[in-house]
Image (cartoon, rainbow, N blue to C red):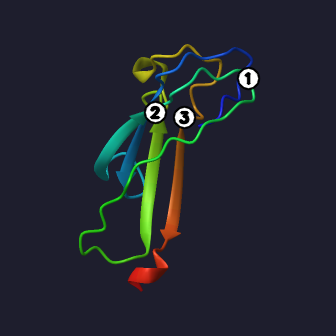
Amino acid sequence: MKNGGSLGVAAGVAVAFYLGTDATGTALGTGKTQGALLPGQSEIVELTFPVGGKQPPFSFFVTVDGGNGAAASAVTECHESNNTAALSGARCWSLD
């Protein structure tokens, strides 16, 4: 997670992980930032994905601070529209 804003943010910002291309996918779990982030700082928030017989390639979607939209946000921001990210084509080479 990266703080691209002009103000610092306290620790504990929620990050939700989904299997799929958007937040309607299967919820995999949540994590939280461990430290406060000043402008420009970033922190890795990770979640172990239980493959459990699923076949790659995988698509993942992540929301930060409740996703896009001020109503879902716990952190006051200038830009509420940059709180999601997607990754498609992820592979675990040992599974192929």
Mark 2 or mark 1, whichever is nearer to me: 1
User: On the rendered image, what quadrant is the C terminus found in?
Assistant: bottom left
The answer for how far apart the CA atoms under marks 2 and 3 are is: 5 Å
Which element carries disc 3, helix, strand or loop? loop
Residue at 42%, 18% in the rendered image: 71
Kindly check if marks 2 and 3 are in contact, taking CB atoms under 8 A apart as contact: yes
Question: For residue 59, which quarter of the picture?
Answer: bottom left
Tell which residue pokes out farthest to the left in this image: 52
Alpha-carbon neighbours of circle 3 within 10 Å: few (<14), some, or many (≥20)?
A: some
Q: Which amino acid does label 3 sit on?
A: Asn
Q: Which amino acid does label 1 sit on?
A: Pro
Front residue of 86/12: it is 12
**Is residue 23 depicted above or below 40 in this figure?**
below
Q: In which quarter of the image is residue 1?
A: top right
How far apart are the two marked residues, 2 and 1, measured between alpha carbons?
19 Å
Residue with the mark numbered 2: 67
- At label 1, counting other C-alpha atoms closer than 10 Å, the crowd grade (few under 14, some 14-19, many 20 or more) is few
Callout 3 touching callout 1 (CB < 8 Å): no
Residue assigned mark 1: 39
Picture residue at 55% right of the left edge, 13% below the top:
76
User: Above or below — where is 36 with respect to 60?
Assistant: above
Q: Residues within 10 Å of mark 2 (few under 14, many from 20)?
A: many
Residue name at image x 36 percent, y 38 percent:
30
Q: Identify the residue shown where x is 60% and y is 35%.
A: 82
Mark 2: amino acid = Gly
Q: Earlier in the sequence, mark 3 or mark 1?
A: 1
- Residue placed most toward the observer, 27 or 33: 33
Q: In front here: 49 or 4?
A: 49
Residue 19 rendering spot, x and y as whole percentages: 35, 57
Dot 3 corresponds to which residue? 83
Q: Is mark 1 on a helix, strand or loop?
A: loop
Q: Which of marks 2 and 3 is nearer the N terminus?
A: 2
